[in-house]
Image: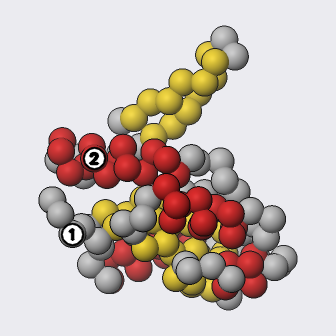
Amino acid sequence: MENLKILVIIPAYNEEESIANVVETVKREYKNCDVLVVNDGSTDNTLEEAKKTSAILIDLPNNLGIGGAVQTGYLYAYKYKYDIAIQVDGDGQHNPKHIADMVNLITTKGYNMIIRFKIYRKNKLQTNIF
């Protein structure tokens, strides 16, 4: 499946310290995507820092919480007919290097949705994909 429209959604609330780095890392790790930052009514300089990047920006006038910010991102993806939408947190806790793996699973296995989570067992990180 060539020429897929892929959107990486980054919900952000008071992430001025990390948002630019997260956007840059996503673009470096997975070049074939658009990046959308949904500023969730931040009271710090998140919006100003996001404006310094190449990301598409949505600035919510009030804090809707993570659910509202993520939903805004998925509605944007739907409106603009993206084939795949992936959420990466604005604080940098999700490693963008996994974006390619998720896109590959969607395109080769036909998955409609992937949930990736990490757990620690005996002080060792394990990641799982469902």
**Location of residue 127 with respect to 64 vertically, above or below:** above
Left/right placement of residue 42 relative to residue 124 reads right
Q: Which residue is mark 2?
A: 104
* Mark 1 in CB contact with mark 2 (< 8 angstroms): no
SS of the residue under disc 2: helix
Q: Is residue 67 visible?
A: no
Q: Quadrant of the C terminus?
A: top left
Q: Quadrant of the N terminus?
A: bottom left
Q: Amino acid at mark 2?
A: Asn
Left/right placement of residue 17 relative to residue 7 reads right
Left/right placement of residue 81 relative to residue 76 reads left
**Location of residue 105 with respect to 42 vertically, above or below:** above
Residue at (55% x, 33% y) in the render: 118
How far from the left and from the top, in percent, is residue 27?
Answer: 51, 65
Residue at (43% x, 73% y) in the render: 34
Q: Which mark is residue 43?
A: none
Residue at (32% x, 83% y) in the render: 80
How far from the left and from the top, in percent, is residue 126?
Answer: 54, 24
Extreme-right residue of the structure = 44
Q: Which residue is mark 1?
A: 3
How far from the left and from the top, in percent, is residue 18?
Answer: 74, 62
Sequence order check, earlier mark of 1 and 2: 1
Q: Amino acid at mark 1?
A: Asn
Left/right placement of residue 70 relative to residue 76 reads right
**Location of residue 122 with respect to 59 vertically, above or below:** above
SS of the residue under disc 1: loop
